[in-house]
Amino acid sequence: MTETRVTIIGGGLAGSEAALYLERLRIQSVLYEMRPKHMTSAHKTGNLGELICSNSLKSKRTDTGAGLLKAELKILGSILIELAENFDLKSGAGLTVDRELFSSEITEKITSSPFIDLKREEISDIKNLSKPIIIATGPLTSENFTESLKSIIGEQFLHFYDAISPIIEWDSIDKEKGFFESRYGKGDENIFNLPMTGDEYRLFYSELIKAEVVDMHDPDKMIYFESCLPVEEIARRGEKSLVFGPLKPVGFTNDNARKAEAVVQLRPENKEGSSFNLIGFQTRLKYSEQKRIFKMIPGLENAEFLRFGSMHRNTFVNSPVVLSENLMLKSAGQIYLAGQLSGVEGYIESIMSGLINALAVYHLISGREFYLPPVETITGGIIRRLITFSENFQPVNANFGILPETISKVRDKKAKRKMQAEIALRAMENWANVFKI
Ligand SMILES: Cc1cc2nc3c(=O)[nH]c(=O)nc-3n(C[C@H](O)[C@H](O)[C@H](O)COP(=O)(O)OP(=O)(O)OC[C@H]3O[C@@H](n4cnc5c(N)ncnc54)[C@H](O)[C@@H]3O)c2cc1C
């Protein structure tokens, strides 16, 4: 056992995984968690590793991004994924856990660990904490701490993030119903457009304005940014507000668009063009409603959603600017960011981030070189997104769009995914073997 104690701030999914994984590597840590003394606006208990919203850790199938990421994490011996499986409600194809049992067990494991010193206090400054430090305070990082982080990271790198638009798998879009063109020929030629007739638009609109939205924990405090209003919110301002806004059918040479009542635009998510986001469709609609209503857009009838739109207060950093290749802050040595704050999006992604940061810290402490997870894995893809420059960095989740197009000649989507998953899992096994995990 080494004498070095790692400081971990935040006992959510990322921080708990990091502490328990370090325990597995026989590294001591001190874990600071502010709840239950100081609650966030979304957490309901003082438990560590609480799932704040849904209790789903998504699909188990390795031909989905979430399923493949979980399979990769199992190879690495993720503690939280193992616990989640222990509390699987087996209610369908996904990994749905009993949230209470899951977080109670995490709390029990941490409180009884001889390797982890749990301190229930809010950290508002890291000046007096011993390094290495893993900051895993999540999307609801306390205000005091956010302020003090700005003095290390820089104000411009911390964003208050209000909404995200759905991401659709390119292969699931009916290309016959749309065309590539940018409005007025300006900007990105990779924008894909889906025109809607007057009848199609009116039907879509009438469903959109009466659709069910997610019940926010504190709706009174929800302040929308005018430039990033949820699509249903714009729609409620009048039937024409969308067609004068994100769906305006102007600036196109395409005949169908010129006759259209509205044009929905999609922007590629990655350079391979395997996934596209719906421009201006940031939304607070329930996932089931997003599926139902956005599939009414001609061309999206069979859309597969790689990510649904969502709306909540969300603090994250512009990680490509802030993080170095060894995953430490560029502005301060031996300080790591994990979880949602570091720019990943989602439960499993946050668990993954806690695990990878624990491994990086372990290598730092033991004086060994740390190599990033292979590029062929979802884990490696997400981590690389965090440290690779992008004009408009957005939180990254597990999806096949982040994998390299190594087998682009395979046309059949199912066969292709199967091969990609096999390659990813083999690459992860090799990586784990090198590290003797
Ligand atoms: C309202 C809401 C709903 C969401 N729903 C989903 C969903 O359904 N599915 C999904 O995949 N993702 C969802 N997310 C994203 C979700 O937050 C992350 O997926 C995941 O919980 C992030 O893990 P984390 O460890 O980074 O943060 P968290 O799990 O939030 O953990 C951070 C911890 O740090 C603690 N903390 C904060 N500041 C301090 C401080 N200064 N000192 C000490 N402790 C501190 C907090 O109390 C918390 O326990 C949701 C996010 C929000 C905000």
Image: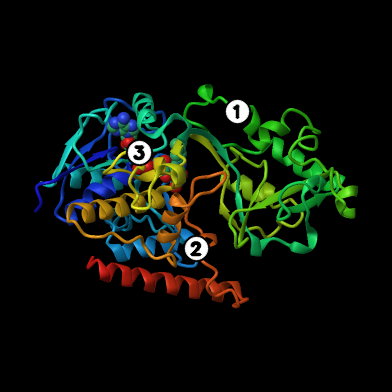
Mark closer to the observer (3, 1):
3
* Placement of 99 over or under 66, stated as above or below: above
Question: In this rendering, would 328 be left or right of 215?
Answer: left
Specify the amino acid type for callout 3. Ser
Where's residue 131, x and y in %? 21, 40
- Crowding around mark 1 (Cα neighbors within 10 Å: few <14, some 14 to 19, many 20+) is few
Specify the amino acid type for callout 2. Thr
Q: Is mark 2 within 8 Å of ligand 1?
A: no
Q: Mark 2 or mark 1: name the one nearer the start of the chain.
A: 2
Specify the amino acid type for callout 1. Phe
The residue carrying mark 2 is: 64
For label 3, the SS is: loop
Q: Is residue 289 visible?
A: yes
* Placement of 37 over or under 173, stated as above or below: above
Residue 225 is marked as 1
Where's residue 104, x and y in %? 25, 43
Residue 331 is marked as 3
For label 1, the SS is: loop
- Crowding around mark 2 (Cα neighbors within 10 Å: few <14, some 14 to 19, many 20+) is some
Mark closer to the observer (3, 2):
3
In the image, ligand 1 is in what quadrant?
A: top left
Q: How is the image coloured?
A: rainbow
Q: Is residue 100 visible?
A: no
Question: In this rendering, would 29 be left or right of 245?
Answer: left
Where's residue 354, x and y in %? 32, 49
Of 212 and 190, the residue lying toward us: 190
Q: Mark 3 or mark 1: name the one nearer the start of the chain.
A: 1
What separation in Å lies between label 2 and label 1 (alpha carbons)? Answer: 33 Å
Q: Mark 3 or mark 2: name the one nearer the start of the chain.
A: 2
Residue ID at (77%, 29%): 238
What separation in Å lies between label 3 and label 2 (alpha carbons)? Answer: 36 Å
What separation in Å lies between label 3 and label 1 (alpha carbons)? Answer: 30 Å
